[in-house]
Each structure stands twice: as structure tokens, then as C-alpha cells.
Image: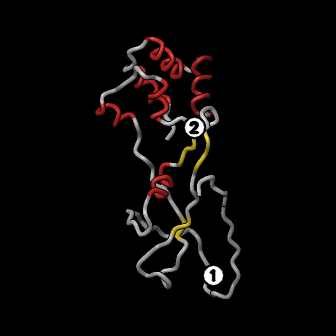
Amino acid sequence: GKPNRKFFETLSFFAKDEADKKALQSIVENNAEGSALYRDLTHDFAHHADVFKKFKSARPPIEQLLNMIPVLKPRSYSIASSPLMHPDKIQLCVVLVDWTVESTQELRLGEATGYMRQQKPGATMMCAVRQSAIVLPKEATKPVIMAGMYRLSTMA
């Protein structure tokens, strides 16, 4: 995920290099220099590892780091299969999240969909099934119009 300003503030306490410390503090202070730096980092979709690459002297202990980075939020996906057809399985409709970082031309994958992409066919993953907000007509012969988002991925 994208680091928030609190992350930069806490990280500044661990910066050994004065230039790193000053830059990290400027992000928190929201001055012109800090705003530009934060905008550049977020424009490139910087994640926590990118920040550590940029500010090499800022290295918190692992115990502190675990408190600085938030837990991933659950992701919701649409079930694309029928329990009548597949009573013991669910098939999901998932769009792979990917993008290219402009400044480095590096291809990035979303955290959850990137993880799913790495799994082998038939892999088991933990999930929870929730009640759908979609209410279908009681009569199966009534037409239903459904729309979804789709985008071609750069990954095969």
C-alpha cells in the first residue's frame, strides 16, 4: 500500500543521514519541498519498499516497522460460478491489477492479485463468503442486465 504521512514521520526518527531526516520531515510538515516530494512518490505509486530505497539511512528495527505498516485490508471479489454446478468450489472473477511506474518503467502488480497470480492451478486459499448485495428476480426467465469493469492486462 501507499505510505501515509505518519509513516514518513515515524521513519524520520530513524534516519541517520541528515538529508534523509530533513526530507522525511518536510513531507510531514507539508512545506513546498515536502509536498513536491510526497507528490512525486505517490505519483509513482511508491510503496513502503520504495521509500526505504530512497531513504537508505532510515532503518527502523523490525518490531517498530511492523507497527508502522498497516495490515492489508480484505479484498472482495465476485463469485463467477454457481453452487448448483460446482457445489464444492467457487470460481472468482478477478481483474489483475498492474501498472508501470513512469520514472523506472518497472511493472508492478497489486498485492492481492499479484499473490493470486503466483499460485499454481488448484491452489487452496483462505477466503470468506458474504451475502451478495445483488438481488436476482425470482423467475429465472426474467432478463438481467449486468455490467462490470474489464481491462486488458499487460501480463499474459
Snapshot colouring: secondary structure
- C-alpha distance separating marks 1 and 2: 42 Å
In the image, residue 12 above or below residue 47: above
- Evaluate if marks 1 and 2 touch, with contact meaning CB atoms under 8 Å apart: no
Name the residue: 48% across, 49% down: 111
In this picture, is 87 found above or below 21? below
Residue 153, picture quadrant: bottom right
Q: Secondary structure at mark 1?
A: loop
**As shown in the figure, which amino acid type bears the numbered disc 2?**
Phe
Q: Quadrant of the C terminus?
A: bottom right
Height in image: 36 above or below 132? above
Q: Please name the amino acid that badge 1 sits on.
A: Pro
Is label 2 in a helix, a strand or a loop? loop
Write down the residue under mark 1.
Answer: 137
> Which quarter of the picture shows residue 149?
bottom right
Which residue is depicted at the point 46% across and 73% down? Answer: 90
On the rendered structure, is 11 left or right of 98?
A: left
Q: How many other residues sit within 10 Å of disc 2, few (<14), some (14-19) or many (≥20)?
A: some
Image height of 105 relative to 96, above or below:
above
Residue 1 in picture, x, y percent from top left: 49, 41
What residue do we see at 62% from left, 22% from top?
36
View extreme (top): residue: 18
The picture places residue 94, in percent across and down from the top left corner, at: 55, 62
Query: Counting other residues with Cα less than 10 Å from the Cα at mark 1, is it few (<14), some (14-19), or many (20 or more)?
Result: few
Q: Which residue is mark 2?
A: 45
Front residue of this view, candidates 49 and 127: 49
Earlier sequence position, callout 1 versus callout 2:
2
Q: Where does residue 48 sit, x and y in percent of width and height?
A: 46, 34
Which mark, residue 24?
none
Residue at horizontal 61 percent and vertical 42 percent from the top: 100
Give the label, 1 or 2, closer to the camera: 2
